[in-house]
Structures are given as C-alpha cells and as structure tokens.
Amino acid sequence: MLLKIMAEDYSEQYSGQQFFAEINMRIRDLEEKQRILKERVMLIGESLIKEREKSFGEIQEMKKIVDDLREENIKVKDMLRKILSKIDKTARTEDVMILQRQFDLFRSEEIAQQLGQSKGEE
C-alpha cells in the first residue's frame, strides 16, 4: 500500500510538473507571438510614417505646381485682354476693304459728275 501511495504521489508530482512545464511553454509561445506582433506593428508604423511624409511632400509639390499654373493662367488672360483691346482699336482688314470699295464708288460717281459737267459746258 505504501508503494501504491508513493506511486500515486509520484504520478501527481510528475503530472504537476508536466502541467507547469506546458504552461511555461505556452507562456513562452505567447510572449514570442507578442514580440513578433510588436515588431510587425513597429514596422507597419514606420512604413506608415514614411508613406505619410512622402505623400505630404508630393502634395506640397502639387500645390506649388497649381500655384504656378494659376499665375501663368492670370498672365495669359492679361496678355489676351491686351491683344483683344489692340485688335479692337485697329481696323480690321475687312473693314478697310469695305471702306475702299465705298471710296472707289464715291470716286467713280465724282468722276462721272465731273465728266457730265465738262460735257455740259461744251
């Protein structure tokens, strides 16, 4: 009987040690998983910060380009206004041709009248 009690005591001790060994192993596994996850989160955070900085730089450059384009647009509009005002002030070719025709008609009538007067005097 004593042997039986000793055997039970030993098996309880062995199963207790085995139980604690398994718990310790699981704790180590969980700690390792937590360490790996922490490293991954840190890497993701670093990548996120780098991407944010890169995006911020690109946005700043785009803003500068947009501002430059606005300034160019304003300059082009001003230039077009000046050109249009000069065009309005100068006579167009069509207008000059119309005036030339009217002048020619008036001139031919004037010549005809002068010829008619000179024939009447004779």
Image (tube, rainbow, N blue to C red):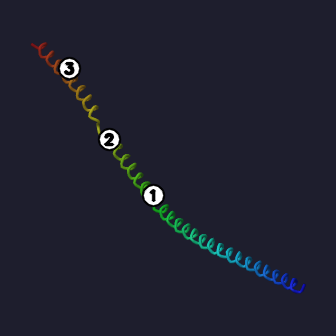
**What amino acid is found at the position of numbered circle 2 in the picture?**
Ile
**What amino acid is found at the position of numbered circle 1 in the picture?**
Asp
Task: Indicate whether 81 appears above or below 104.
Answer: below
SS label for mark 2: helix
Q: Is residue 32 left or right of residue 16?
A: left
The residue wearing badge 3 is 109
Task: Indicate whether 50 appears above or below 73.
Answer: below
> Between residues 118 and 17, which one lies in front from this camera angle?
17
Residue at (25%, 25%) from the top-left corner? Answer: 102
**What amino acid is found at the position of numbered circle 3 in the picture?**
Glu
The residue wearing badge 2 is 87
Residue at (45%, 60%) from the top-left corner? Answer: 64
Farthest right residue in view:
1
Residue at (58%, 69%) from the top-left corner? Answer: 45
> Between residues 27 and 73, which one lies in front from this camera angle?
27
The residue wearing badge 1 is 67
Find residue 73 and report its horizontal and vertical position in percent.
41, 51
**Tags 3 and 2 touching, CB below 8 Å:** no
Residue at (18%, 21%) from the top-left corner? Answer: 108
Q: Nearer the viewer's eye, disc 3 or disc 2? A: 2
